[in-house]
Amino acid sequence: MAQGMDRVVVIGAGQAGAQTAYSLRQSGFEGAVTLLGDEPYPPYQRPPLSKGYLKGELDADRLFLKPASFYSDNRIDLVTNATPVRVDLAARRVELPLGPALEWDRLVIATGARPRALSIPGAGLEGVLALRTLADVDRLRPYLKKGARLAVIGGGYIGLEAAAAASRLGVSVTLLEAAPQLLGRVTGPEIAGFFLRTHRAAGVDIRLNAVIEGFEGGGRVSAVRLADGVRLECDVVLVGIGVIPNVELAQQAGLACGAGLIVDRAGRTSHPDVFAAGDLVQRPLVHYGRVGRLESVHNAIEGGKIVAASILGLSPPIEEAPWFWSDQFDVKLQTAGLWTGADQRVVRGDPESGRFAVFYLKEGRILAVDAVNAGPEFLVGKRLAALSARLAPSELADVNLSMKDIGARALG
Amino acid sequence: MPKITFIDAAGTQRTVEAKNGMTVMETAVKNNIPGIDADCGGACACATCHVYVNSEYLDRVGKPSAMEQSMLDFAENVKENSRLSCQIKVADDLEGLSVTTPESQH
């Protein structure tokens, strides 16, 4: 272990920050670990927030990654409601609004991202909400009574998952998407079309090419006003139009930032003793020969493990192809790899059957797969994407060939 | 509340008290049992909570769903008594259950 490395401070107690702390302890680090979270809760899973937790199927304590006793048992000093105001790289200190500054030998920045806000008239009205934290869902849920009217702004995963959950609660849901296709930032037309049909069949009113002018209401939102003159009455609005990385603290400290806080493959920022992981980082995407910012549990967990290994001078875990999932109604979508740059899409199985996959290829090599209720396609596809495996589209599309066989041919 | 024993690949046993209604995976994670990562938090999306169920309990644990089975088909070192622990709900009749974690998850 490196000399002079007794104190690690982690800013951010989301999945990435928490994983860093867990991995440091699991790998035998004996020094002090301080985990600073700006929420009132111990680290928790965010994915169920727009799924089971929104539907009221889970209690908050089932979201917590570890029981409260874990932190004291493992000497992780978890500080909640802590929002650092400044990072001083020269003095190696983190300043909090109250109390003495925290000194560190290694600093980890895992401040995540925050929902992008709409800057249109009425965006500040009561009942115009976002969905990122437990507190956000606790604000949203009381509105979602049977028969209530929810307007979702944005047809990305958060908006669609919330629309599905609310619809199951008996809420009347209208989803407004500015683009001509759902999920435009993250997937192709086959998957987007499948979710469009699934939601419409379940009674969600999806409107594409919707240009929103503003929200109306006296104090509390009562309608969405569209550019085409339509006035859509509603009881609550959920805005899900993407996130902005929380890079301000790092930027003010003078750390290099691009699309996010820039880290190398070891999770190291432009300062040799400062590391970062999670939604806020721009990291090397080793399977694709470029850099990028990812927003997923896999990215947070892997980043946390990499940072812990780097701090301790251990060999880092092997990077997996990025993976992700989404649950909507009875559909489980599992994605492996990144489809950006694909020049060919191969559909395997019949979308009408509710079980199919889309493989994305570039120059004959597999970039990514979107698997709908199709575990084998996902699991094999994840390995194929990691290796940029070359496969004949006709074989991929042939459902008489099992994924096991396809995997064996490509992976040897 | 039933007791569940987790056995790691090296044979080390850890017995913990489980809560009815929670899953075996959640029981492991909350008790910091090594070898059960459960990256996806129990969404049956990642197959990192794979366990071998003590054969005496296989019937009580029940058969895997189609989705779980398809994930298991492609997990590493799968055996006949393989299950994803995120899909096993704790109930009184699982008192004394023991599960072993595969070496590949350590």
Image: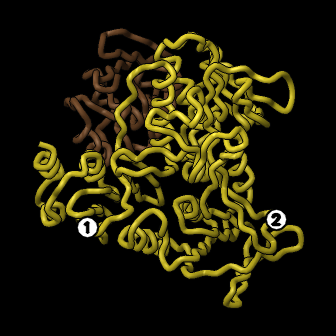
The chain identifier of the residue carrying mark 2 reads A
Local packing at callout 1 (Cα closer than 10 Å; few below 14, some 14-19, many 20+) is many
Q: Which chain is yellow?
A: A
Percent across and percent down for residue A286 are 36, 44
The residue carrying pointer 2 sits among few (fewer than 14), some (14 to 19) or many (20 or more) residues within 10 Å by Cα, namely some
Quadrant of the rendered image containing residue A344: bottom left
> On residue A347, which mark appears?
1
Image coords of residue A21 (percent x, y): 57, 24
Name the secondary structure under disc 2: loop
Three-letter residue code for mark 1: Val
Q: For the point 63% across and 68% down, which residue is it?
A: A152
Against B74, residue B54 (above or below) is above
Q: Which residue is mark 2?
A: A124
Name the quadrant containing residue A75: top right
Q: What's the distance in space between the residues labelled 2 and 1, CA to CA?
A: 43 Å
Count of marks placed on residues:
2
Q: Position of residue A127 (x, y in %)?
A: 78, 63
Q: Is residue A21 above or below residue A326?
A: above
> Chain B colour?
brown
A399 to A75, vertically: above or below: below
Front residue of A90 and A393: A90
The answer, for residue A56, to whether it is visible in the render is: no
Task: Work out whether residue A96 or residue A70 is closer to the camera in this orientation and state it.
Answer: A96
Q: Position of residue A28 (x, y in %)?
A: 49, 12
